[in-house]
Image (spheres, rainbow, N blue to C red):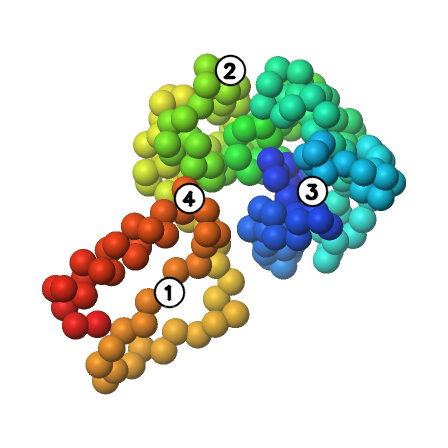
Amino acid sequence: MHILILPSGYPTKEEPLRSIFFKEQALALKDGGHKVGVIYSETRRITNINYKNFKRNHFQITFNDEEGVNTVRLHGWNILMMRNFLGVNLWVKQTLNLYEKYVRMYGKPDIIHVHCGLYGGLAAKVIKDKYSIPYVITEHSSTILNNSLNDYNKQILTESYNNANKLISVGEKLKSSMKNYTNNDIVVVPNIVNTDGFKVYKDHKREKFRFVTVAYLKKNKRIDLIIEAFNKLKKIIVI
């Protein structure tokens, strides 16, 4: 298939780990034998603007082969404050423009894979309405899990979900939260893991287990709960 990925975030030169799992999935699809492309309208914080950064990112559009994935980027800035009406609509228009340029360069995709309904889902809906390209949404966002959206974003998410050809959640709890915004069916497909990078040895003779958690040290990741849980666990069993 020819799959075009429309992420709501993607690695940039300044932030190479930003939403890196979206890129990892694109590479996995490519390795699976599919033709894969990405369009991404980059949004940088306006507080970081200076002559050097603006010279490097001045709303130019680039076409690159990024590890076998055809990637079209607009090197932009968050000039209208993303997440309000003006900012969201500008981002959607920029994404539509990238789609049209992508098609002229690489051909029409069979399907669009959106990562996160806000705001990639809205852009995909606009493309579907204009060019009849089906789209699926894989939802990752913890803001939906926590039900912390304002009315404007709830409206956008409902519109994006209801017009998608398929909805995917990366977990069961997130799936339950997604149901607040649509009556469409939702399937659960967990985040992918490249198991070629490590091996798990099942040694039943070991007297101790080793536990590991991998995450950003951000408040919403609740690493504090993990520490508290292990503190309670050590009082019950010997680790």
Which amino acid type is shown beneath numbered disc 3? Val
The answer to whether residue 70 shows anywhere in this view is yes
For label 2, the SS is helix
**Residues at marks 2 and 4, CA–CA distance in whole angstroms:** 25 Å
Which amino acid type is shown beneath numbered disc 4? Lys
- Foreground mark, 3 or 1? 1
**Residues at marks 2 and 1, CA–CA distance in whole angstroms:** 39 Å
The residue that label 2 is drawn on is 152
Q: Earlier in the sequence, mark 2 or mark 4?
A: 2
Where is residue 138? Give x, y as percent: 50, 38
The numbered disc on residue 172 is: none
**Residues at marks 2 and 3, CA–CA distance in whole angstroms:** 27 Å
**Residues at marks 3 and 1, CA–CA distance in whole angstroms:** 32 Å
The residue that label 3 is drawn on is 38
Q: Earlier in the sequence, mark 4 or mark 3?
A: 3
Q: Of residues 19 and 138, which is closer to you in this image? A: 19
The numbered disc on residue 219 is: 4
Horizontal relation, residue 66 to residue 220: left or right: right
Where is residue 184? Give x, y as percent: 40, 25
**Residues at marks 4 and 3, CA–CA distance in whole angstroms:** 30 Å
Which amino acid type is shown beneath numbered disc 1? Val
Q: On the image, which quarter does residue 175 sit in?
A: top left
